[in-house]
Amino acid sequence: MIYDYLVVRFGEITLKGKNKKQFVVKLENDVRDKLRKFASLEIKRHFDDLEIKLNNETADDVLAVLKKVFGIQNIWPAIKVGTDIEDIREGVLRIANQEKSAETFKIAARRKDKRYPIHGSELNQDLGGTVLEHCDWLHVDVHDPDLRIRVDVGYHETHIYGKEVQGAGGLPVGASGKVMLLLSGGIDSPVAAYLVAKRGAIVEAVHFQSPPYTSDRAKQKVIDLAKKLREFGGKFVLHLVPFTEAQVAIRDAVPEDYRITIMRRLMFRIAEEQAARRGALALATGESLGQVASQTLESMNTINAVTNLPILRPLITMDKIDIAKIAKEIDTYEISIRPYEDCCTIFLPKAPRTRPDRNHAARFEQKLDVDALVREAVDGIETIVIDEDAQEDALSQLL
Ligand code: ATP
Ligand code: MG
């Protein structure tokens, strides 16, 4: 194994002076938690980084997990050798040989101990020469190298850092409180969940289902999405809301072109109630301005009128193509394009109203017992906690 340890650098949190300590501790806990399965790792917290000593683990396995921890800006795989120039050369070569995809490189060497007999610039030349001699696929590029090998010669040991690995960025999960997200089986809302979690929020989700019009496979699809999202935020709490009765009532009482509007107003009321029960201070959706009829400004205005909670819409200005790109990166896309019916597609008109009016909506709702529909839906919620160790058949664990 070539690397001895990984250095984890924090992102934005280093800027936030007074909360820094708290965030760093939170991040350290997240890292420890996510790396639990690697029993022999040793994790040490320093002032502005974490050092993770690899014992039996390979750097790649640990990196794959760390890349999904919010709050980490980047990760440097590193090795530790003595201060003898022969050892340093050998260490630098170990890293250069590992990075077969790089074409250009640069050595950035420093000596902490000014008594060390070889100066920084001489070290650069010496070590650069060693690499050129042994790695014929590599050329020097001092401005924009594919591989920058940093060498810090200390008093008793030398640290040599390989290629920097990008972290997920953002803030540690939990740093920003809790948000209740409306999670459909579509492409957009899982991406919204990811982006909100990235800003440090604990994301719980409500999903509306209308059995028997929606199938078990549609439910499984949402559970599979939640499992993917769990990889970022730790455990994921998913609330499955029975929505059939509300939809049937809407179909029977509301003119066709207002059904989507009223349905969404009910969704927001139910989500707000569940947010209150679970201590969430905001709702979130995967809406994007103008994408479909229910996402015009008029629609949002009419739908929003039923709640006082802030509604986070992280995708609001994004194009579908950019949303899909993130969905692919976080590996939810393939699940989202499975074809099962969503509750939104049943009983709905071919031509929904694109500019609904608040007052009309409120008037149509008078024909419904809105409070009872909300209460029954919330009372009927089935909550599933998805965490790392959860088995497929043991997933359904009522809180
Ligand atoms: P998505 O890809 O997220 O489904 P969409 O482009 O299909 O979005 P809509 O169907 O209009 O758009 O839904 C808008 C938003 O409403 C979704 O992003 C999601 O937040 C919420 N939503 C829609 N359907 C459901 C559902 N069955 N359960 C929970 N939330 C839903
Ligand atoms: Mg949808």
Image (cartoon, rainbow, N blue to C red):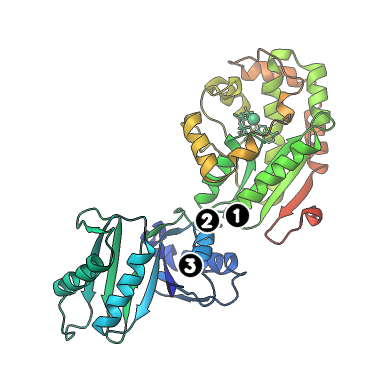
Residue labelled with disc 3? 59
Q: Position of residue 30 (x, y in %)?
A: 55, 64
Q: Are marks 1 and 2 in contact (CB under 8 Å)?
A: yes
Relative to 79, 152 lies left or right: left
Relative to residue 67, is residue 5 depicted above or below?
Answer: below
Q: Residues within 10 Å of mark 2 (few under 14, many from 20)?
A: many
Residue at position x 75%, y 51% in the image? 384
Element at badge 2?
loop
State the CA–CA distance, disc 2 to disc 3.
Answer: 15 Å
State the CA–CA distance, disc 1 to disc 2.
Answer: 7 Å
Q: Quadrant of residue 190?
A: top right
Residue labelled with disc 1? 231
Relative to 48, 52 lies left or right: right
Relative to 21, 220 lies left or right: right
Residue labelled with disc 2? 68
Q: Position of residue 373 (x, y in %)?
A: 81, 32
Q: Earlier in the sequence, mark 2 or mark 3?
A: 3
Relative to residue 6, is residue 253 depicted above or below?
Answer: above
Q: Residues within 10 Å of mark 3 (few under 14, many from 20)?
A: many
Relative to 368, 344 lies left or right: left
Q: Are marks 2 and 3 in contact (CB under 8 Å)?
A: no
Question: Quadrant holding ligand 2?
Answer: top right
Q: How many marks?
A: 3
**In front here: 375 or 13?**
13
